[in-house]
Image: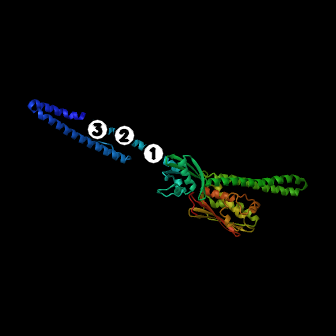
Amino acid sequence: MLRRTRYLLPLAMMLAALIGAAGRSVVWWLVPLLGLAGLGLDALLLRISEERLRGVADQVVKFASDVERPQTLTAEGGREWQRLVQALNDVATVLRDRFEALRDERERVQRVLDAIPASVMLFTDGVLAYANPAATAMFALPEDMVDLTPMRALGVAGLAEAVREVLETDRVVDVAVTRNGRELVANLSRIATNEVAVIVTDLTDIRRVEDMRRDFVANASHELKTPVTGMQALADSLQMAMERDPERARTMAERIQREATRLAQLVRDLLDLTRLEEGADGRGQRRVDVTALAEAQVERARETAERRGILLDFDASPEASVIGYPEDLKVIIGNLVLNAIQYNRDNGRVEVTVRRRGSDVMVRVTDTGIGIPEVDQDRVFERFYRVDKARSRAAGGTGLGLALVRHAVERHKGKVRVASVLGEGSTFTVMLPVDGGTSEG
């Protein structure tokens, strides 16, 4: 109305001037003319306003359809139009900032969920809406994840039923199930009217580690108890035999010494195993001449081999070195050589070979001993696992030698394998990367 008055006032003043000049005789036809002019001008202004409003509306719709790349709104017109457009631009700035903040927050949450080792899934309106990489791998989900119901996505009736229970009862549900031989524990909760969050943890490896630790404690206790008990009994008998039977006392003292040696070796092996299981941080690594180190270990074991008439051969290339831990390499070669001697037959043969093979150094120990049954070959690297328990203990073995070899090889990112024929002998082959990379052997 104000704007219309602004335009009509000059027109009225002009008409008043005409009336004064023409006299009263023309008033009767000027009044209708003034009314018609006002109506036409009003329609014109209304049309201009509608066009400007339509232009602003089109820009707002375009802004709403592409919030990530908004454009500044513009409009022609007076001060009121400019104030309206400025207000809309201010709203657009606030919305853009809020949108960017929400997008950043969503990306942070996404990165956190993607990094969680447990499987995280979200079901919305009865279908899978989100799954982190751990869940995708655990449940072998397709990339598109289109229309995956709880049963199709989870593959276990117990988990799918738990999703339905959470929606119906609004309670947090914990459920333990088995899927493809894996022990799974799931926690489910409702986070919105038709949304259920599912967090699944695989306990299989944890259970396996717990069992291994429990077995380790039991086996270590048994292995420690055997020499200690023997030493206690021998010490008691020694006291009584020292005066009455000196020869028997000397025999008992020798047995005590053997048991003490065995006990000391077991303690050393346990300490080595603890050190190797702690992993490697790179400190202490250096270039090691595997040929020289292996030759030293062979010479160290030669006296033991000669006592049983075992021929110990050594064959190595002159240039075979790796970046590694010298003490770990001694553990690898020393245990393999002693193992080949202990489980060999009298007057047998042990061959130790060191060669450069591309980006690896190969250490191979072959014996002509009792061999390993095929069913036991996958387990010989386990702690305290013995193929022939009686012979191992009689030979003074601790049951940790090959476990130490495996851990030391893994610390060097290498590989160890065994090939054996029962009654004919065994061959252990270790491949160690020259520069600490992944072994190709």
- For label 3, the SS is helix
Q: Give whichever of discs 2 and 1 has the lower sequence position.
A: 2
Residue 396 horizontal/vertical position (percent): 75, 59
Task: Inspect the image, locate mark 3, and give the three-letter code of the amino acid beneath it.
Answer: Trp
Residue under pointer 3? 81
Residue 325 horizontal/vertical position (percent): 62, 55
Residue under pointer 2? 91
Q: Give whichever of discs 3 and 2 has the lower sequence position.
A: 3
- For label 2, the SS is helix
Residue 224 horizontal/vertical position (percent): 75, 53
Task: Inspect the image, locate mark 2, and give the three-letter code of the amino acid beneath it.
Answer: Val
140 with respect to 58 (left or right): right
252 or 303, which lies in front? 252
Residue under pointer 1? 104
Which colour assignment does the render follow? rainbow
Cα–Cα span, label 3 and label 1: 35 Å
110 with respect to 407 (left or right): left
Task: Inspect the image, locate mark 1, and give the three-letter code of the amino acid beneath it.
Answer: Asp
Is residue 4 visible in the rendered image? The answer is yes
Cα–Cα span, label 2 and label 1: 20 Å
Q: Is residue 206 above or below residue 99?
A: below
Q: Is residue 428 above or below residue 42?
A: below
Single out the residue that lies furthest toward the front: 28
Please tell me which residue is depicted at 44% across the width and 44% down the height of the picture. 102
Question: Counting other residues with Cα less than 10 Å from the Cα at mark 1, is it few (<14), some (14-19), or many (20 or more)?
Answer: few
- The mark found on residue 407 in the picture is none
Q: Nearer the viewer, mark 3 or mark 1?
A: 3
